Image: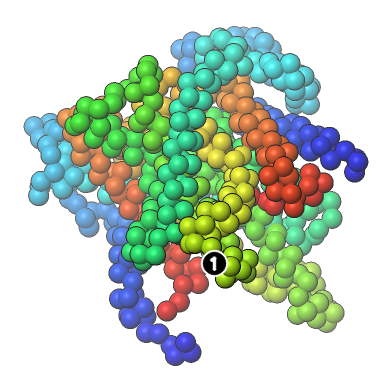
Amino acid sequence: MKGFPLLRRILQAVVVLWAAFTLSFVILYLLPGDAVLTKLGSAEGGPSASPAQIAALRAEYGLNDPVIVQYGKHLLAALHGDFGTSVATGDDATHQVLTALPPTLAVSGLALVLAIVFGGGIAVLGTFTRTRWVSQLLLSLPPLGTSLPTFWVGLLLIQLFSFQLRLFPALGSTGFASLVLPAVTLALPTGAIIAQVLAKSLQTQLAEPYIEVVRAKGASRRRVHFAHALRNAGLPALTLVGVVAGNLLAGSVVTETVFSRDGLGRVTAAAVTAQDVPVVQAVIVLAAFFFVVLNLAVDLVYPLLDPRVSVRKEVPAHV
Amino acid sequence: MSEAVLPQRFLIRRPGLLLSGLILAAVLAAAFAPTLFTGQDPITGVPSERLQGPSLAHLFGTDETGRDVFARVVHGAGLSLRATVLAVLVAFVAGSALGLLAGFRGGWLDSVVMRIVDVLQAVPPILLSLALVTALGFGTTNVAIAVGVAHLASFARLMRAEVLRVRSGVFVEAARASGVRWAGVLGRHVLPNALGPVLVLATVTVGIAVLEVSALSFLGFGASPPTPEWGALVAGGRNFLATAWWMTTFPGLTVAAVVLAANRVSRALDGERS
């Protein structure tokens, strides 16, 4: 395999994806708690269902097969993109999850832009300024950002910008204006993480000997900061991409619930509420898919940006 | 800095830390003896006093059935705190045990455990918790377990790294050479020396656990309605955002204050000296 580093990376990615599927199978299908009983409980009036009905449903869902056979069947189906039908809506789970994806991507995309601009800006300014209190204030913002409950921040934003100032709609999923508040809410924890990592990385770089050399050669502070330190500090932050994407996806569960927006997060929350196992599994595998693909992309792009790293060598691990 | 710093002076120079300690102490007291803070009933309200703004009689105002929001926050401290402690305990105990096993035994067991840990980290913690809640069912305890399991991977990883570091120490070799059994080596030499950073991680996880437990409770997967729980209290005020801002603002502020306080204290425990 040594000759095919790219192939090895892809293979690793596939293994992680498979493992994530297996993990979700173990959690969702093997833990106590019975999808059939839940379905009967929610849809057909609870314990009134006769033992015969339960037995028929168990057979229909293949719950009488040995575990390993169930696992094999599910894995085979999942390979074809089939995670089963939603227990709650009767829809195809994969279809339900994929159709919910675009609105979530729109909010997440805007949130990502905000997070990079503001998170990155805070880190750069916080380490650049020579005014002590400004720097202290700026660098104390990220820890604050990770400590605030996002559901609460979202509701505060609604109170302020929708009900008091009437600038943005409080609820709904139509138009660009409805995108702003959810994106800000979603960007808060993500931007805080980006700011924390970038600020730390910048501080490390600024203490390096090469900075001293550049300064001694007479480069301006701005040039030292932006052309030298930031370029070197920004690269490791790239390895955060997988974590950030996961954050956005997970954060959308809360954000979309707060703002009553359609999207993957809302579908996830509804699926958990209905204990809709196929849909939840599809979401988990999709999240792992994003994580794996993005990390793979970073692994492949990294050597192009930083010639010291080749695909053969390890990219420095994130966090 | 060899002179001993008096604890009083240490705290006075850090008003933030002092305040954080007081907040945590107050929350702890509220969890064990809520009646110390309020005499009002958190479950049944006074209909004639519904939706009143904050006042001296009702510090945090009242909700749509006339229940005192402050009383509900105080009485919710017990459940929310118990869930947090349980979540951290699950992550700490299970994660450390796995990491200890992997680091101390090494070999194929190490590989297997660490691959499982890798997979746990490939799914965002909240989604992992949601999957666990789907399987286990709702309720405060299940939410706590779900949050704990979602964070077990980082404990396992850290504990393993620490054990690997300690295991190669000369004193461990000496203990082995002088005939101490493996359980003795593990319990008396490896574990005490590896535990420090893991305990620090545990204190860092407290803040995260408060946030995630309250988020899951906000989504409605925690205790069932009349029982007060911080996240659920915020959710309960959602329908009254326009008319009763206090119903969401104060419970949310409580969660934020507790998380900030926990983070501040954990930073102090992580080797902050004079």
Image quadrant in which you'd find residue A134: bottom left
Q: Position of residue B39 (x, y in %)?
A: 17, 50
Q: Provide the residue designation for mark 1.
A: A218
> B158 above or below A87?
below
Compare residues B47 and B126 and report the one nearer the observer. Answer: B126
> B174 above or below A57?
below
Image quadrant in which you'd find residue A25: top right
Mark 1: which secondary structure? loop
Q: Position of residue B103 (x, y in %)?
A: 75, 60
- The amino acid at mark 1 is Gly
Compare residues B140 and B16 and report the one nearer the observer. Answer: B16
Residue at image position (69%, 74%) is: B188
Count of numbered circles in the view? 1
Is A172 left or right of A220, judged from the image as shown? Answer: left
Q: Quadrant of the N terminus of chain A?
A: top right
> B183 above or below A249?
below
> Can you see residue A179?
yes
Residue at image position (74%, 49%) is: A307
